[in-house]
Image (tube, helix red, strand yellow):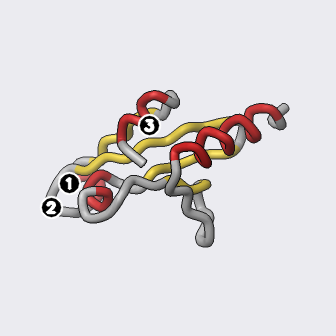
Amino acid sequence: MTEQTFIDLGFKRNKVTPEESGYDSTYYYYTLDIGDICLMSNSDDVANDKEWSCCIFDSMTMEIKGAGDLINLIKIIKNNTI
């Protein structure tokens, strides 16, 4: 999946400075809130070493790697959120 996928799907870019994180450099990641569900990408520093992916925030077992799967998941969540 590419970074452009998140942009096209309306994800918000979240920048984290070294002061906020305690790391040596600034990094960013993407989020999309649908109801009380937050979809979150990996960060750009991780994606440079592997591909971009997405998960449901706080999920330890799910990782979405394909744009088609992410699009379908967003549709399912939106169609079933009150």
> Which of marks 2 and 3 precedes in the sequence?
3
Q: Quadrant of residue 33?
A: top right
Give how far apart the Cα atoms at labels 3 and 1 are: 26 Å
For residue 62, which numbered disc appears in the image? Answer: none
Label 1 neighbourhood size at 10 Å, few (<14), some (14-19), many (20+)?
A: few
Residue depicted at 71% across the width and 42% down the height = 36
Query: Mark 3 against mark 2, which lies toward the viewer?
Result: 3
25 left or right of 37? left
Instruction: Give the residue pinned by disc 2.
Output: 24
Badge 3 amino acid: Thr
Residue found at x 20% / y 50%? 26
Residue displayed at 61% across by 65% down: 62
Answer above or below: position of 72 versus 44: above
Number of dots carrying numbers: 3
Residue type (three-letter) at the residue carrying disc 2: Asp
What is the crowding at mark 2: few (fewer than 14 residues within 10 Å), some, or many (at least 20)?
few
Name which residue lies at 25% across and 64% down.
Answer: 49
Numbered disc 2: secondary structure: loop
Which quarter of the image is occupied by the C terminus? top right
Q: Position of residue 37 (x, y in %)?
A: 68, 45
Please name the amino acid that badge 1 sits on: Pro
Give the spatial CA distance, label 1 vs label 2: 6 Å
**Closer to the N terminus: mark 1 or mark 2?**
1
Mark 1 element type? helix
Residue 56, position as x, y percentages in the image: 61, 54
- Image quarter of residue 60: bottom right
| Residue of label 3 | 5
Q: Would residue 56 be found to the left or right of residue 20 on screen?
A: right
Residue at numbered disc 1:
18
Q: Do the residues labelled 1 and 2 touch (CB within 8 Å)?
A: yes
